[in-house]
């Protein structure tokens, strides 16, 4: 069960990257996660502890905006004009978290599939990185595919784009047939690999993460 926790998964992946030659694309997801955690901590904990009135001010504005609080004018408790600077900053952070967290996590999942894996393979082939890294990362993606709907959607998105590129009628007329065949076999292998992973019993059955 502990292995199905995404924090554990990324912790061990971070240890792997720490022990291997750095590949910059692999650090991008951690940068984004760190930024989101900072935003959540600042808005949800830090500002409320340092400035105790912030929680009440933000709650009043949110209640007013949702229609559950009493109407307020520019000087009322539901107006941002009367808020303290820390409360306005907290509102900005809350809006960033609300409006961009999901899109950021979707982007991370797509980046992990479409950018990090090719970068690790290229790094290994050009002898600039570890040969073990791609295999470790494939195992990581396999786990993520089982427990994360976002990773599944990322794989589906990449597959659709590659099918569009390699298969007629959308493929370029000069695309050699053997290239299409090689891609088809590689794609079918990856699909089969993922389906077998989904069929295996998992302690996290029925659970999905970001």
Image (tube, rainbow, N blue to C red):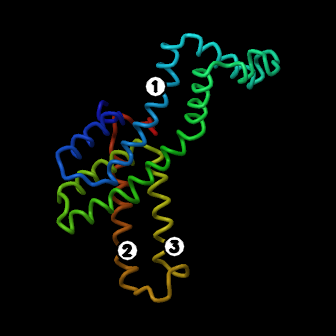
Would residue 45 appear left or right of 182 to someone viewing this image?
Answer: right
Secondary structure of the residue carrying tag 2 is helix
Quarter of the image with the N terminus is top left
From the viewer's side, name the closer residue of 153 and 21: 21
Query: Mark 1 to mark 3: distance in Å?
Result: 42 Å
Pointer 1 residue: 41
Pointer 3 residue: 164
Residue at the location (40% across, 36% down)? 34
From the viewer's side, name the closer residue of 144 and 68: 68
Would residue 24 appear left or right of 171 to someone viewing this image?
Answer: left
Give me the disc on residue 183.
2
| Vertical comparison of 135 with 73: above or below | below
Q: Label 2: how many residues lie within 10 Å, few (<14), some (14-19) or many (20+)? A: some
User: Closer to the camera: disc 2 or disc 1?
Assistant: 1
Mark 2 near mark 1, Cβ–Cβ under 8 Å? Answer: no
Question: As drawn, which residue projects farthest toward the top?
Answer: 52
Q: Label 3: how many residues lie within 10 Å, few (<14), some (14-19) or many (20+)? A: some
Query: Mark 2 to mark 3: distance in Å?
Result: 12 Å
Secondary structure of the residue carrying tag 3 is helix
Query: Mark 2 to mark 1: distance in Å?
Result: 44 Å
How many numbered circles does the render carry?
A: 3
Earlier sequence position, callout 1 versus callout 3: 1
| Vertical comparison of 23 with 102: above or below | below
Residue at the location (17% across, 60% down)? 131
Residue 48 location (% of width, % of height): 52, 15
Residue at the location (57% across, 21% down)? 86
Residue at the location (26% across, 41% down)? 14
Earlier sequence position, callout 2 versus callout 3: 3
């Amino acid at each position: 069960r502990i292995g199905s926790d995404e924090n554990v998964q990324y912790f061990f992946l971070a240890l792997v990257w720490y022990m291997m030659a750095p590949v910059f694309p692999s650090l991008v997801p951690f940068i984004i996660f760190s930024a989101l955690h900072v935003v959540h901590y600042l808005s949800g904990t830090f500002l409320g502890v340092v400035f105790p009135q912030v929680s009440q001010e933000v709650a009043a504005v949110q209640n007013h905006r949702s229609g559950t609080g009493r109407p307020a004018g520019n000087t009322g408790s539901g107006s941002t004009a009367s808020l303290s600077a820390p409360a306005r900053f907290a509102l900005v952070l809350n809006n960033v978290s609300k409006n961009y967290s999901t899109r950021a996590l979707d982007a991370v999942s797509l980046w992990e599939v479409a950018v990090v894996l090719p970068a690790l393979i290229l790094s290994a082939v050009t002898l600039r990185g570890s040969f073990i890294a791609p295999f470790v990362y494939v195992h990581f993606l396999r786990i993520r595919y089982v427990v994360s709907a976002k990773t599944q959607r990322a794989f589906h998105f990449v597959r659709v784009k590659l099918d569009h590129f390699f298969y007629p009628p959308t493929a370029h007329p000069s695309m050699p047939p053997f290239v299409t065949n090689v891609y088809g076999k590689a794609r079918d292998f990856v699909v089969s690999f993922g389906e077998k992973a989904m069929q295996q019993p998992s302690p996290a059955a029925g659970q999905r993460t970001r």
